[in-house]
Image (cartoon, rainbow, N blue to C red):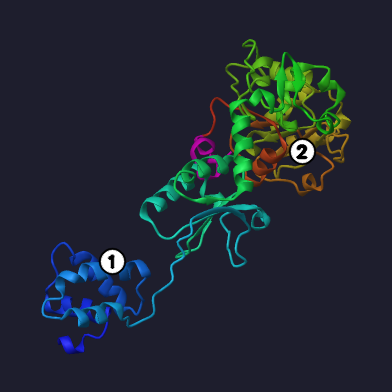
């Protein structure tokens, strides 16, 4: 390309590359610009200003008037780049796909939209936030400048902490929510529903109205069922090492009942004393006959046969089926049923009708059919695993890892 053929700044860049006159210091940026031009992508205003400055040292035998005309002239109109950096409350785009999240209503929820032009350091910060907040609470469409996080107490603090000092324009609504969450984090005893000297504090009357009087008058039972009513265990310490106290002050819904450490009678006595009914018992089919006999023998003294029901039978296991019939354990399940026996291998559909709502599960072993396990996890705030150890699957698999 001769000087006479150089009509605009894009021509000039490509001419320098073709004749090999680009300095080593400018080689990377000039080749990058050339690839962009070749693809038919226009320069941005900043790219145009940058090139005008760099090309001055390459004008050589081009006279000043001709050089000015070339660098001011464009092959394609400048490309507009939205450089706004914002954090605001938003809904997901209409075409957003969120198959990774099991919550079918998640598209209707409010999200925090973080928008910015491409910037490697900011992208790395977004990646850090995704790891911290969780990929199921994040949405981004490839090549989009918008990154979405579900609006929640968990997400708002790290997001605002990350972008507040990066010249982002943050919506006041989000800043107010952030301030409220930070205030609660710094002084939880003033806001969170909790126990203080065996008394419920910061608990709305509407929640108190839902709590049975039996629990309100017994702090141990109330603390045992605190998760059911959104009561935090902030500042509460175990008072002893008895079986009842270990169950009441458990750190999660799961409790391992090792047969070598706890005899069945003491476990079921604790369940009874804490009034942890309705109760679902998950039996292992291979050992179901021995397990139901063992369990029934301990509970028959305080739970009548009419309040118990076995919802499965074993093919080729006449003794098990006869036991169910002889003990009249083939009762209809309703809201008066105290104990329901199921198999760890299958979830009976009758349990999905809502008449029986267990708050406790006693599971022989620590693995179950995923439908059984999901049913139990969704409804029970105490799950007693009768095993010597928690199954590695429950500890480490992707399925159980989020529980």
Spatial CA span between label 2 and label 1: 85 Å
Q: Is residue 236 visible?
A: yes
Question: Can you give x and y, in whole percent of width and height, for residue 289 in the image?
Answer: 70, 32
Magenta span of residues: 392-403
Circle 1 sits in a helix, a strand or a loop, which is it?
helix
Say above or below: 332 vs 96. above
Would you identify the image quadrant in which residue 242 lies?
top right
- Disc number placed over residue 50 in the picture, else none: 1
The percent position of residue 397, horizontal first and vertical second, equals: 50, 42
Q: Position of residue 94 (x, y in %)?
A: 62, 66
Q: Disc 2 or 1, which lies upstream in sequence?
A: 1
Residue 401 shown in magenta: yes
291 or 258, nearer to the observer: 258
Q: Which residue is drawn at the image coordinates 75% and 42% (left, top)?
A: 312
Q: Quadrant of residue 255?
A: top right
Residue 360 is at least partly visible in this image: no
Q: Which mark is residue 321?
A: 2
Q: Say left or right for 367 vs 60.
A: right
In the foreground, 292 or 71: 71
């Amino acid at each position: 390309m001769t000087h006479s053929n150089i009509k605009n700044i894009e021509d000039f860049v490509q001419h320098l590359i073709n004749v090999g006159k680009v300095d080593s210091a400018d080689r990377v940026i000039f080749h990058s610009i050339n690839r962009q031009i070749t693809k038919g992508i226009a320069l941005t205003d900043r790219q145009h200003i940058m090139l005008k400055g760099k090309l001055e040292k390459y004008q050589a035998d081009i006279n000043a008037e001709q050089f000015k005309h070339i660098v001011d002239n464009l092959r394609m109109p400048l490309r507009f780049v939205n450089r706004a950096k914002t954090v605001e409350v938003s809904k997901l785009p209409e075409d957003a796909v969120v198959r990774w999240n099991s919550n079918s209503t998640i598209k209707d929820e409010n999200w925090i939209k973080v928008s910015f032009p491409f910037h490697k350091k900011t992208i790395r910060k977004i990646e850090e936030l995704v790891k911290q907040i969780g990929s199921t609470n994040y949405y981004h469409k490839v090549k989009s400048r918008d990154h979405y996080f579900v609006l929640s107490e968990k997400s708002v603090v790290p997001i605002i902490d990350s972008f507040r000092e990066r010249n982002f324009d943050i919506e006041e609504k989000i800043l107010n929510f952030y301030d409220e969450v930070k205030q609660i984090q710094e002084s939880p005893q003033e806001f969170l529903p909790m126990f203080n000297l065996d008394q419920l504090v910061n608990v709305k009357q509407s929640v108190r109205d839902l709590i049975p009087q039996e629990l309100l008058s017994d702090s141990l039972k109330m603390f045992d069922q605190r998760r059911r009513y959104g009561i935090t265990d902030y500042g509460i310490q175990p008072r002893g090492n008895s079986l009842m106290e270990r169950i009441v002050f458990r750190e999660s819904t799961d409790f391992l009942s090792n047969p070598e450490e706890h005899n069945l009678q003491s476990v079921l006595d604790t369940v009874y004393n804490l009034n942890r009914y309705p109760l679902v018992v998950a039996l292992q089919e291979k050992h179901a006959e021995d397990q139901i006999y063992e369990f029934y023998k301990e509970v028959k003294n305080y739970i009548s046969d009419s309040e118990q029901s076995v919802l499965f039978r074993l093919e080729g296991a006449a003794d098990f089926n006869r036991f169910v019939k002889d003990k009249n354990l083939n009762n209809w399940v309703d809201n008066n049923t105290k104990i329901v026996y199921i198999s760890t291998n299958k979830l009976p559909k009758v349990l999905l009708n809502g008449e029986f709502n267990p708050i406790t599960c006693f599971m022989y072993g620590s693995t179950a059919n995923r439908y059984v396990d999901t049913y139990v996890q969704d409804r029970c705030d105490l799950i007693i695993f009768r095993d010597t150890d928690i199954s590695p699957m429950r500890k480490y698999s992707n399925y159980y890892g989020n529980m």
